[in-house]
Image (cartoon, grey):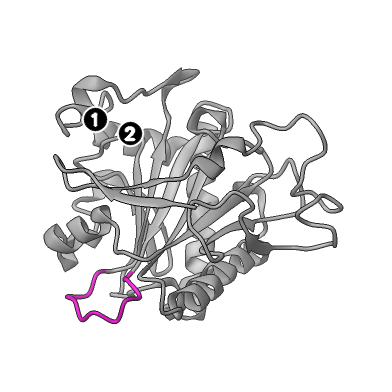
Amino acid sequence: MAGYRIDPLSGAPAWMVPSRQGRPNLPSEACPFCVGGIEAPEPYEVLAFPNRWPPFEKDRAEIVLYTSDHDASFAELSLDHARRVVDLWAERSAALGARDDVAYVLIFENRGPEVGATIAHPHGQIYAFDIVPPVVATEYAFASEATFDAPSDDVIVANHGEWSAWVPLAASWPYELLLAPSNDVPDLPSLNNNERSDLASLLIDCIGRLDALFDAPMPFMMWFHQRPFDNVVRTPLRLHVHIAPMLRSAGTQRFVAAGELGSGVWFNPIEPITAAAQLRSAK
C-alpha cells in the first residue's frame, strides 16, 4: 500500500500513499464521529479507533475522539473529561509503543479547515511510525534539560501545577506555544496522576486563550513529542507539546511560503514577548 522512500537531496523520508487520495473532504452528510455515525455507533465519552484512510499498514494510524459533542471545543471540556482524553492518549501510546513494528508514537491534532481538517468534530490522530521521525531525532541532537524550562517570565503564558506553557523565543509561528512538565517525564504513559490532570488543565487553558485572542476558534496544529519506543538507549528527552496557531491577526492566516520552505529559515511577524503578553491577557 505505502511506498517508503528517501529523498536523495535532503535525506528526508516520504511515504507514497495513493490509497488516501479517495478520503472524504469536509463531508456534508451526517458526521461519522457523532453517536450513531459510521465510526461511533454506540454512545461514548472518549474513543480511539483505526483510521479508515491510514498512511501506514497494520492499524498503525488511529483517530481519537475527544467528546461526542460535535460543536464542543477542547477548551470547553470539564477537567475530568479532558483528563480522560489525556489518559486515552497515554493508553494508546503504551499499546502502540509495545508493538515490535513501532518505533515512535506521534499524538497530534489538525484543527480547522485552514490546516486540512476534513471533519469539524473535536478529534485528533495518532501515527505509529516504524522509524524515529527526523524532527524527533533533531530534537535529541539539540535539546537539553534547560530547553524545557521557560527562558524568562516575559514569555510564560500559564502555569498549572507541574506543567507550564510559554511562547518560545525562537518561535516559528505567531502565538506558538510550548508546553512542558517541570520534571523529566519521558512519555505520556509515565505521567503520574497529578501530572496528567495538570496537562489536561493547561490544554483547556491554552486552547481557550487562543480562541479568545481573536474571539473565534483558532485553527492550529498540535503535536506531542515523547520518547521513542524502539528500545534504543538515548539521552532522556522530556515529554512536551507544540501548538502552532495558524492566524497572525484576526481573520489573517500566517502562510509558510517559498522563502521559508526553500531556505529552512522561519520569519515570524509577531515578537514572542508580545505574543505571550497578548495570550496572558486573553480570557
Are the two marked residues, 1 and 2, in contact with CB atoms closer than 8 angstroms? yes
User: Where does residue 66 sit, x and y in percent of width and height?
Assistant: 65, 56
The quarter holding residue 10 reads top left
Q: What is the span of residues highlighted in magenta in the rendered image?
A: 227-237
Q: Residues within 10 Å of mark 2 (few under 14, many from 20)?
A: many
Q: Secondary structure at mark 2?
A: helix
- Residue 17 at x, y percent in the picture: 47, 45
Disc 1 is placed on an element classified as loop
Residue 21: give x, y in percent of width and height: 55, 36
Residue occupying the point 17% across, 75% down:
235
Other-residue count near label 1 (Cα within 10 Å), few / some / many at <14 / 14–19 / ≥20: some
Q: CA distance from mark 1 to mark 2?
A: 6 Å
* Quarter of the figure with residue 180: bottom left
Q: Residue at x 16, y 43 (%)?
A: 8
Q: Which residue is mark 2?
A: 275
Amino acid type at mark 1: Glu
User: Which of the two residues, 145 or 47, is positioned nearer the viewer here?
Assistant: 47
* Nearer the observer, 7 or 223: 7
Kindly identify which residue carries mark 1. Answer: 271
Residue 267 visible to the viewer: no
Q: Is 233 in front, or is 160? A: 233
Q: Residue at x 24, y 54 (%)?
A: 134
- The amino acid pointed to by label 2 is Ala
Say if 270 sits above or below 70 in the image.
above
Picture layout, residue 168 above or below residue 39 = above
Whether residue 44 is visible to the viewer of this picture, yes or no, is yes
Q: Is residue 230 magenta?
A: yes
